[in-house]
Image: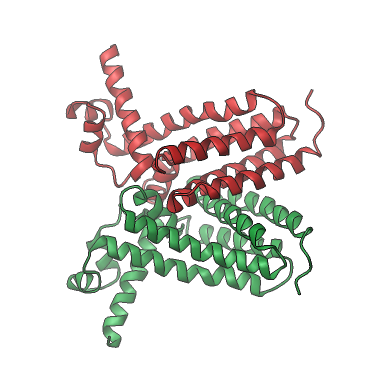
Chain colours: A red, B green
Amino acid sequence: MDDKRTGTRDRLLRAGEGLFRTQGYSGTGLKELAQTARAPWGSMYHFFPRGKEQLGEEVVAYAGEIYLGAWQAAFRRGGDPGVAIERVFLAEARLLAGSDYRDGCPIASVTLDVASVSEPLRAACASGFEVWLDAIAQGLIAAGAPADDAKALAGFILSAMEGAIVLSRAAKDTAPLLQSARFVRQAIEREAAGWLPPS
Amino acid sequence: MDDKRTGTRDRLLRAGEGLFRTQGYSGTGLKELAQTARAPWGSMYHFFPRGKEQLGEEVVAYAGEIYLGAWQAAFRRGGDPGVAIERVFLAEARLLAGSDYRDGCPIASVTLDVASVSEPLRAACASGFEVWLDAIAQGLIAAGAPADDAKALAGFILSAMEGAIVLSRAAKDTAPLLQSARFVRQAIEREAAGWLPPS
């Protein structure tokens, strides 16, 4: 694929990611998406011959990969895993407030719109979340957590993060993210007290 | 307002509530909604002259009132507040699994679709969540929590619940709700250990 085409495809994915965050999957029309991406209309069906559903699947996978880096980076800075996770919540609070509460989670938005309507899109959302859950669990395991404990904590941590984004967007207030950050950090610290020191 | 008209309006709200849970606000057309409610098309603009946005606001308020009862009932059964909240998570897990993961939270769905697009709908979602946050905080205060602690815990509890519903719907698995239930209960129990016994 030549550079120009790759560039157009990437712009479509980025535009979809941005629009789904802000206004969901169902509220985003393909024409608006092509215009936002400055992409010719024909390119939409060139790159996504199965149409909006395929675009949605690939946007969700793209979003999964982008934010994977944020979870991994939090743990790479080392130190207490509760503090590492708290940093991600605080960074998300700054990101949300800085975007006037527009930049939510694209995978959550797609899930609530179409998880019960499109099985391929539901599966794409499950896989996107799974990428993040694995990154969180791996970070906890590296900090000494047994695998089962890491998996359960990861489900709880990502649940609290996703819900706090929803409540913060509704209230236009970072309080739910900051409140959740504190209790999630404490939960991780209490669990971590029972782990062996990482080798 | 006579009974027949009240009945139609109520059916429209209930149909909206059900459809927004499953497929979001943007994915729900007014014709589909009127058909689901077995309501004549003209009744839509009779009861909601400002159209879909007004209907959305009233559906969100209606949903807020319905689920208020679930939070209050959990605390009315008395006992440990951590166990009371855990019961709500476990009941939600049964409800979700029993509906093949269709019956999500209508207020979360509306928030992610239009919080950044319609200020009246965002404010309605904020108010709906606030009704639940208040009920949770009041339950915790009745169990002995200081008001500040109750408010912060309520934000965390509802965040974890809303996010766990999103993740459970994506995965078609109750694990995120069950994982969150456990850590949320433990967080409440740890806080409650520092409260004075309720009078």
Q: Nearer the viewer, residue A7 or A93?
A: A93
Extreme-bottom residue of the structure? B2
Q: Is residue B172 visible?
A: no
Q: Position of residue A148 (x, y in %)?
A: 71, 39
Which of the 4 image quadrants contains residue B76?
A: bottom right
Q: Position of residue A23 (x, y in %)?
A: 33, 45
Q: Residue at x 37, y 51 (%)?
A: B115
Q: Nearer the viewer, residue B194 or A39?
A: B194
Is residue A50 placed above or below A198 in the rendered structure?
below
Q: Nearer the viewer, residue A136 or B118?
A: B118
Q: Left or right: A199 with respect to A175?
A: right
Which of the 4 image quadrants contains residue B142?
A: bottom right
Q: Residue at x 28, y 34 (%)?
A: A50
Q: Is residue B74 visible?
A: yes
Q: Left or right: B193 with respect to B44?
A: right
Q: Left or right: A30 with respect to B90?
A: left
Q: Position of residue A18 (x, y in %)?
A: 35, 35
